[in-house]
Amino acid sequence: MDRLSLGTLGQHLQRLRLEKGLSLSQLAAAAGIAKSNLSRLEQGNGNPTLDTIWRLAVQLDVPFGTLVAPISVPLGEEGVQVRLLDQGQDSPQVDAYWMRCAPHTTRHAEAHTPGARESLTLIEGQLEAGPEGETRHLSAGDTHGFPADRPHLYRTGESWATLLLSVVYAEGGPTS
């Protein structure tokens, strides 16, 4: 992530934390990250992983998309790029993402907020996706929906995989 995007994410993260009335220590402990790392992140430094951003969003009770909405570049790590495409304003809230995974990549995703579901459509490549222990193999054009409120994964084989992904939050779930 470039410096400008990190600064934008940091300011947005700090504003959301203060709106929730949480101290740096409280949010860091709840999200399972070091207070010093959270402080650096809010100052626009550091290199947060996708999992760290997800954990912060869950603890702030906001959709991942709300936390990353100000960032226009794809977020990425270890062969995975994710970009928010749009956030619905209705209830339940639906966030739409573009995601691209390099060959031979396994991305373990932490549980989202209770009742959250994911639906993905594979645009190109081959992909194994779903809750850990209950994954499904997909080819281009396949669609798969699953509960996202428990750990889940995305695993590629020999080629790149590109997908559209939506996260549907439960009624009364995170607010934007």
Image (cartoon, helix red, strand yellow):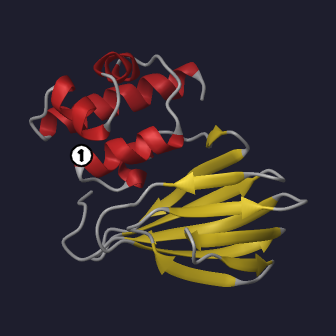
Q: Which amino acid does label 1 sit on?
A: Leu
Q: In this view, does 106 lie above or below 138?
A: above
Q: In this view, does 112 lie above or below 57?
A: below
Picture coordinates of residue 126 (x, y %)? 82, 70
Please give the name of the residue rendered at 56% of the width and 61% of the height, measured from the top-left corner. Answer: 97
Q: Is residue 83 above or below residue 92?
A: above
Q: Is residue 87 left or right of residue 71?
A: left
Task: Report the residue that reaches farthest toward the right.
Answer: 158
Q: In which quarter of the image is residue 114?
A: bottom left
Picture coordinates of residue 118 (x, y %)? 49, 73
In the picture, the quarter occupied by the N terminus is: top right
Task: Report the residue that reaches farthest toward the left.
Answer: 21
Please give the name of the residue rendered at 33% of the width and 41% of the height, measured from the top-left corner. Answer: 56
Picture coordinates of residue 154 (x, y %)? 65, 62
Q: Quadrant of residue 73?
A: top right
Residue pointed to by mark 1: 60
Please give the name of the residue rendered at 38% of the width and 20% of the height, measured from the top-left corner. Answer: 37
Q: Is residue 70 visible?
A: no
In the picture, the quarter occupied by the C terminus is: bottom left
Q: In this view, does 170 lie above or below 101?
A: below
Q: Is mark 1 on a helix, strand or loop?
A: helix
Q: In this view, does 19 lie to the left or right of 130?
A: left
Q: Is residue 51 visible?
A: yes
Structural crowding at the residue carrying mark 1, measured as other residues with C-alpha within 10 Å and reported as few (<14), some (14–19) or many (≥20): many
Disc count in the image?
1
